[in-house]
Image (cartoon, rainbow, N blue to C red):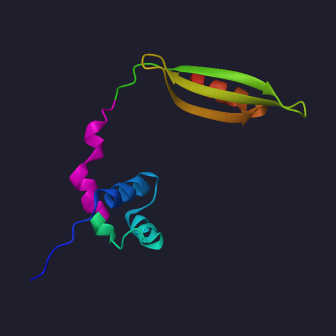
Amino acid sequence: MYTRNRTSSNITGYGLYLYFLGLSFRNTSKALSFLKIAKTGHVSIWNWLQKYRPWKYFKKRKIKGYIIDETAIKADSSELICLWVIIEPKHKEILAMVISKKEICLLQSDFCLR
C-alpha cells in the first residue's frame, strides 16, 4: 500500500519565505532542491500559498495623507545629494525613500507640487 509523505512545516516555511523574498514559484522549488532541503515542484509551493493564505492576516490600510520631507546633504565633492522620505503620519510609517542628485531635486519638487 502507498503511504503519503507529508511535507514538514519547516520545509513549507522555507518555501514560502523564499517566495516572499521575490523568487518565482519555479525558482523557489529549484532553490529548495539546490539547498537539499526538499525536492518539490512549483505547483506544491503554489498550493502551500493557497492553503496558508498569508495575505488574510495583513490588512491594507487606506492612506489619507502623507508627508514628503526633503533633506539636502553636501557630499565630499561639494555636490548636493537630496534625501526624500515619504511618511504616512497616522501610523508613522515610511512609505518610500529616494536619494537623488541636486539637479534632479528641483525637478522632483516641481513634480510633487503638481
In the image, residue 95 above or below residue 65: below
Where are the magenta residues, as a range? Answer: 45-60
* Image quarter (top left, top right, bottom left or bottom right) of the C terminus: top right
Q: Quadrant of the N terminus?
A: bottom left
Q: Could you say which is closer to the camera, residue 37 or residue 28? A: 37
Residue 4 location (% of width, % of height): 17, 73
Q: Residue at x 41, y 64 (%)?
A: 28
Residue 13 image offset from top left, x and y in percent: 35, 54
Q: Residue at point 85% right, 32% down?
A: 79
Q: Is residue 18 left or right of residue 111?
A: left
**Quadrant of res 43:** bottom left
Is-magenta flag for residue 49?
yes
Q: Is residue 111 left or right of residue 75?
A: left
Residue positioned most to the right: 77
Q: Is residue 106 left or right of residue 95?
A: right
Can you give x and y, in whole percent of width and height, for residue 75 in the image?
84, 31
Percent across and percent down for residue 10 are: 34, 57
Q: Main secondary structure of the magenta part?
A: helix
Q: Residue furthest bottom?
A: 1
How many numbered discs sit on the rendered protein? 0
Question: Which residue is more in the foreground, 110 or 35?
Answer: 35
Q: Quadrant of residue 55?
A: top left
Residue at position x 47%, y 69% in the image: 35
Please tell me which residue lies in front, 10 or 57.
Answer: 10
As for residue 79 lying within the magenta part, the answer is no
Please tell me in which quadrant of the rendered image residue 91 appears: top left
Residue in the image at 46% along x and 67% along y: 31
